Amino acid sequence: MTRRSIAAALATLAVATALFWLYFQRQAAADLARTSARPATRNTGLSLYQFDSVFTSDDGRTIHLADLRGRFQILALIFTRCPRACPTLVKQIQAFERALPTQQRRAVRFALITIDPDHDTPQVLHAYRERMGLGENWTLLNGAADAVRDLAASIGFAYGSNDGEAPVHSKLVTVLDPEGVVVQQQLGVEGDQQRLLDSLVGGAP
Amino acid sequence: MKAWFLSAGVCASLALGPTSERELTRGPATFHSRSAEHEAARSGPSAAMFLLPPGTYEPFFKRAGAPVQVKEFFLDRVPATRSEFREFVEHRPRWRRSAVTPLFAEARYLADWSGDLDPGPAPLQAPVTFVSWFAAKAYCEYQGKRLPTVIEWERAASGSAPGEPRAPFQFAMGQAAPELAPALAFGAVWEWTHDFNSVLVAGGSDDGPASSQFCGDGFRARDAKNYGGFLRYSFRSSLKAGYALKNLGFRCAKDAA
């Protein structure tokens, strides 16, 4: 083989590699875009990110809900003293997270907001994160009672004090699209997981 | 620059300066309230508030620690009217029908109005309906008031017919408790409350492991024959804050002292 033909072969190989690399990048980007895409008809006037109340994350940062924009969010309202239902719910959501295909798992984040802000300070939430083994793709938020009531009332999450006992509340799980619009809700994550999964690709609920 | 600050300061002090007193009546004594610039602009009959005395209340659901202590508070005699709401949206343009954010009021917000500032042909003194919880809250705040809690509202409104131990269906929208709040008028509309979403009919976190969404599961009413109460609590549990419904209005409350 001449040096020329080797050079030509290497050049061809380099070009081919570059082309393949570009192709796979575009595919990955398209997959991510498809997962994050919302139909053009979605009314962003319904975005929960229009609530401008201030929350505090478990690592002490000031967070507005709008800071969650850009990815699908699976949202649940819980409190750390909850004896049974909340830990079960969080574990179910974690199992759902682990079972997600890679593309979806990269596109999705998880958010927990406490309905017991006086007790569930950011430090308490942080200990809860460690105890439950929640990764970096989970956001834990503490907000004022009124801010939480506004958000909960908007999405249909019911909770109330049980006279000094643990607050009673529903097991509602809410999926927000990257613009903060509710696209799916269900009670718990034990039953129909396909609908949850489908809602993460921007399909109609 | 200085002139701007000066004129802004003059305008601000004019706006915040003179206020009018509005008399709030209760049983034995009267309560005087100062309110802000909107009070001077109010027209139409001044809606009186009624002071409910402190006391205990047995909530609809059996709860640990019941009965509940309720502090004294003021409650509007009647639900907010269409003419009062019109005045509110005149002063708070972002609550006008054409401007409101969909998150805070669904598409049917003020559906029976003819325009942003035109309540349409229905009587102006009738309760305003097709209003969302957010709009009701904003109205009460504008008035220097707040929405009543479920407990407060129920205490005032779960009266029954004379001789009847409990409220039948026809009092589902409320009946003034005669010994507590005779001056209050209920029954025209369902009414928003501050913590309407504190009502869990079923599917709650403290139900057993086999909890479901069925009506009978986890429902722990104190009085199984309080039909009016059943209807109200079921209705509340179906609501979301953005809903604007034909027969759903509200009235405001105010802390005493």
Image (cartoon, helix red, strand yellow):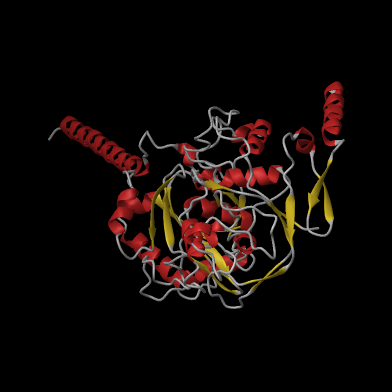
In the rendered view, would you say A163 is above or below B140?
below
Residue B215: give x, y in percent of width and height: 39, 66
Taking depth in this image into account, of B85 and B18 the one nearest to the observer is B85
Residue sticking out furthest to the left: A1
Residue at x 51%, y 42% (from the top left corner): B103
Residue B207 seen: yes
Residue B188: give x, y in percent of width and height: 56, 48
Taking depth in this image into account, of B160 and B76 the one nearest to the observer is B160
Please give left or right for residue B14 compared with residue B78 in the image: right
Question: To which quarter of the image does residue B56 belong?
Answer: bottom right
Residue sticking out furthest to the front: B163
Residue at x 43%, y 67% (from the top left corner): B202
Residue B187: give x, y in percent of width and height: 56, 52
Question: To which quarter of the image does residue A3 belong?
Answer: top left
In the rendered view, would you say B236 is above or below A17?
below
Please give left or right for residue A189 compared with residue A48 in the image: left
Q: How many marks?
A: 0
Please give left or right for residue B11 compared with residue B64 in the image: right
Quadrant that contains the C terminus of chain B: bottom right
Quadrant that contains the N terminus of chain B: top right
Taking depth in this image into account, of A115 and A8 the one nearest to the observer is A115
Residue A61 seen: no
Residue at x 50%, y 48% (from the top left corner): A68
